[in-house]
Image (cartoon, coloured by chain):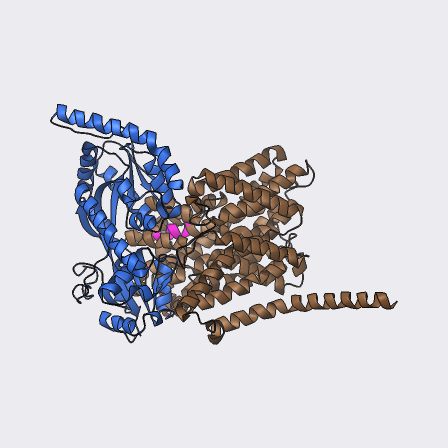
Chain colours: A blue, B brown
Amino acid sequence: MSGTRARARAVPAVFAASALVLAGCGAEGASDSGEWSPQQPIEITAPADTGGGWDTLARTSSRIMEDAGLVDQSVQVVNKPGGGGAIGWSYIANNAGDPHKLFVTSPPILFVPLAGESDYDHSDFTPISRLATEYMTYLVPADSPMDTFDDLVGELEDDPGAVSVAGGSAPGSMDHVALAGAADAAGVDAGELNYVAFDGGGEATTALLGGHVDAAVSGAGESMELIEAGEVKALAVSAPERVGVLPDVPTLTELGVDFTFDIWRGVMGPPDMSQEEISYYESVFAEMMEQDSWKEESSKLGWTDTYQDSAEFEAFLDEKHTEFVDILDEVGLQ
Amino acid sequence: MDTLTQLVSGFSVALSPENLLFVFVGVLAGTIIGILPGLGPMTAIALMIPIAFGMDPTTAIIMLAGVYYGAVFGGSTSSILLNAPGIAGTVATSFDGYPMARDGRAGKALAVAAIASFVGGTVGVVGLMLIAPTLSKVAVSFGPAEYFGLMVLGLTAVVSLAGKNVTKGLISAVVGVIIALVGIDSATGTLRFTFDRPELYEGIDFLIVALGVFALAEVFVLLSRRGHGGAQGGVTSLRLSKREVRAMTPSALRGSVLGFFTGVLPGAGATVASFLSYSTEKRIASDGDTFGSGNIKGVAAPEAGNNGAAIGSFVPLLTLGVPGSGTTAILLGALLVLGVQPGPMMLEQHPGVFWGVVASMYIGSIVLLILNLPLIPLFAKVLNTPKAVLLPLVVVFCVMGVYGLSFSVFDLWLLIGFGVLGFLMRANSFPAAPLILGLILGGLMERNMRQALQISGGDWSVFVTQPIPAVLLGLAAASLLPTVIGLIRRRRERADREREVPAA
């Protein structure tokens, strides 16, 4: 119901934007260059509070873009927290066709709508670039009898409910799906998992360190230090190939479990952007990732650069969406 | 001795002119941002992060830590003067701080807050220095079942915060717990009481409720009295008598220690610490019944508690790399970008950073005190402002604070709603403090209870077979005993009297 209402509000904007797109196409036909450049300051929305992952990405990008002189306009970061992203997304959706309003994004743009908590989903927006990716690790306490991912699978096969696994997000969201997908691929009944939702990765890891849960899923970046110090054992990482910061941790695929999970980060724009506008931003972000300052900061945060342009990013999102629908179906949350 | 040499080298780092300057900058910025409602330590740190980029990592951490405890301190000023808590951690300070200000003792209340904060900060730093590595084990020893016990113990404070009418206090607390239920249920992902409003999905921010039922409600009350009562102009000196110093010292010390240990627990934090310190002190103090009407112990305990906790929360951050709160999570992010990975190896890999930060905290506490004592008369002048000017200012303050949280007009309607609720509660003598307590602790209690049961596979015995939860729940039951016995005795007396009447 509320979805219809929100969309109805956006209708005039959509019309205006379609007109703009048509005008854009016309222009393309007329001139060979088809160049577009921003006419006013660029606004990057972080659909969350200051200080979170989205905010960090937005502020890092805007600073590097300005410092390196990649854009002629200034780049401002706007925080629109609320609804796990839903408030920020509806703000962008209501600015359809305004090529000066971008937002930073990551897997919740798929998960939150799947949970029925947003009127808009990834298909309502214009993918611009995927920038970087972090991977999930599957952890157990240092003194756990489990030493390998196979051990964990063994325990789960015996009695999936008896192994408590902590994660930092709500059921049906990121950490849970990273666990359920891996379990499912390893032949465990994902619907029977005992997933314990904590408020953020920090709390989940603390519960693991104290031995209150048997295992945990956590981003590779945030658990790197604890793994190196020997406080926890990393059984596997959800990357397609071993990650630089954790060279000794095997990937799931290496272990014969056909599953990968990306905590990707990227940039999207409002609905109805023209091809010229998309191309402009694609090249700006591609150039941004060439900067030394970006390389330095992203590696400190444990991110791996995995650039995709608009078309690849869109295909990637659709593919992930289908995959997650299947996993959630398996878990019984869809 | 090793600690001592390390600390000396830490001081040599912290006392460099550059670092001294940035301790000062951080503490000053933090204090100012903390005074403004809605802008808590989280925002303060986020705002300062761009400045920190490009700095030497140690200098940057020293500055950001200064911002953090500066903001925790600054929040108390608006709690005391305007009944408008600047941050969640200073709500408990307003219980006695604001009544003191209304009695014309604003200067004293602010001085007590400044000194107690200093004590809390100092005790915290000593704790951090001496036992941080050992404490990291304490920090992780608390799992969901243990937190559940702690929250239940905290909630029993309702009885002491309720004042004369325990029933009304309990009703208030239950309303608080109900407010805490709004939003996405973290255990199942279900939406609860959100009425299809995405603005409610993440729950109702604590500060909206606190500013509504305290500050805005106070404005309504003063308006309804048409010029009678309210803050009295006379701002007395901030000098404390010997008797007052003697009264507040033990409270501040107890609050510091309790606050520090609560802060060490990643799931608790400064807000819970200040409430626990306040309610514990109210129970221990011989004049506990005057708490809530301007007892300086009621200002000293929570202020020492929240500052002790602010320092305590650095223990899990620095020794485990685990952020205990939203604020330390932001700090962690900033550290990572600066190339310092806090965690078990930090003491070995970056000893200079660790000890530099510890030393700078000593210096920061002193700077905080020096900075704030002279400013107190200036701050307290706020109360000399005519009511016709002050009340609209408080309203602007509240609106700004709430709007600054989310930039959402919806939240402003919520603020007005809670203001009206607070006014109606006051008019019918329902205490507001238990509502706030229920809101903070109730949400945490529920979440931890369900996590514990999820882990145990639905077996309730985890709460009594584990030592820590069992002890905490036992303490909770014991602390309720006097009240329950009192109630039973009164009821029996009434029954006796009723029996005597027909006999006579």
Please report the residue visible at 44 percent of the width from the left and 58 percent of the height from the top.
Answer: B311
Position of B53 relative to B493 (above/below): above
Between B493 and A48, the one lying in front of the other is: B493
Does the magenta-highlighted stretch encompass residue A83? Answer: no
Please report the residue visible at 44 percent of the width from the left and 64 percent of the height from the top.
Answer: B450
> How far from the left and from the top, in percent, is residue A196?
37, 63
Considering every residue shown, the one lying at the far left of the view is A32
Considering every residue shown, the one lying at the far right of the view is B504
Give the position of the N terminus of chain A as an image quadrant.
Answer: top left
| Magenta part of the chain | B61-67
Between B28 and B286, the one lying in front of the other is: B286
Position of B495 relative to B192 (above/below): below
Considering every residue shown, the one lying at the far top of the view is A30
Does the magenta-highlighted stretch encompass residue B62? Answer: yes
Total numbered labels placed on residues in the image: 0
Q: Is residue A66 visible?
A: yes
> How far from the left and from the top, in percent, is residue A27?
17, 25
Position of A130 relative to B486 (above/below): above
> How far from the left and from the top, in percent, is residue B493?
77, 67
Give the position of the C terminus of chain A as an image quadrant.
Answer: bottom left
Secondary structure predominantly adopted by residues drawn in magenta: helix
Please report the residue visible at 35 percent of the width from the left and 51 percent of the height from the top.
Answer: A115
Between B341 and B216, the one lying in front of the other is: B216
Q: Is residue B121 visible?
A: no
Between B475 and A18, the one lying in front of the other is: A18
> How far from the left and from the top, in percent, is residue B417?
55, 42
